[in-house]
Amino acid sequence: MFGIGWPDLIFILLLIMLVVKPSEWPSLATKAGRFIRLARTRLAPILLEVKDISRSIMEEGRPSEPDGWTPLPQPYQKGGEFPMAQDVRPETK
């Protein structure tokens, strides 16, 4: 969940409890609940669309590559150096 774990959430809640007066906690909880409900209802169609797209991609499979074509190794892969790092000096006889 966005890289936030339970200890982080507990720390945030403790900070909120220290900043907000105890008499305002119920109204704050109500507003947070409404916001979460609104976010879920607004994001539900988008998430369903993303799931449908990913499902259709998985069913179709990976497209085949053209004949005779192979991707070049990238610098972060084994055997892939930057083009300028290769020795391009002409051969002398």
Image (spheres, rainbow, N blue to C red):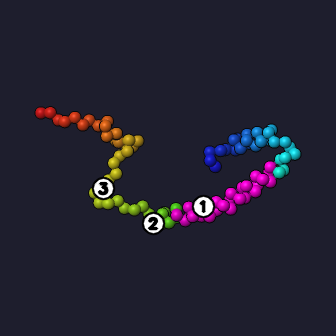
Is disc 1 in contact with disc 3, using a CB cutoff of under 8 Å? no
Residue where numbered disc 3 is placed = 69
Look at the picture and state if 36 lies above or below 17: below
Q: Is residue 30 magenta?
A: yes
Element type at mark 3: loop
Is disc 1 in contact with disc 2, using a CB cutoff of under 8 Å? no
Instruction: Give the number of marks.
Output: 3
How packed mark 2 is, by other alpha carbons closer than 10 Å (few <14, some 14-19, many 20 or more), is few
Question: Residue 66 occupies which quadrant of the picture?
Answer: bottom left
Look at the picture and state if 75 lies above or below 32: above
Residue where numbered disc 2 is placed = 60
Q: State the image coordinates of residue 49 (x, y, percent, origin top left).
A: 57, 64
Q: Is residue 41 left or right of residue 51?
A: right
Tell which circle, 1 or 3, labels the residue nearer the N-terminal end: 1
Q: Nearer the viewer, mark 1 or mark 3?
A: 1
- Prevailing SS of the magenta stretch: helix
Q: Nearer the viewer, mark 1 or mark 2?
A: 1
How packed mark 1 is, by other alpha carbons closer than 10 Å (few <14, some 14-19, many 20 or more), is few
| Residue at 55% across, 65% down | 52
Q: State the image coordinates of residue 24 (x, y, percent, origin top left).
A: 84, 46
- Per the model, the C-alpha gap separating discs 1 and 2 is 20 Å
Q: Which residues are magenta?
A: 28-53
- Per the model, the C-alpha gap separating discs 2 and 3 is 21 Å
Q: Amino acid at mark 1?
A: Leu
Residue where numbered disc 1 is placed = 47
Q: Amino acid at mark 3?
A: Trp
Question: Residue 61 occupies which quadrant of the picture?
Answer: bottom left
Q: Is residue 93 left or right of residue 58?
A: left
Element type at mark 2: helix
Element type at mark 1: helix
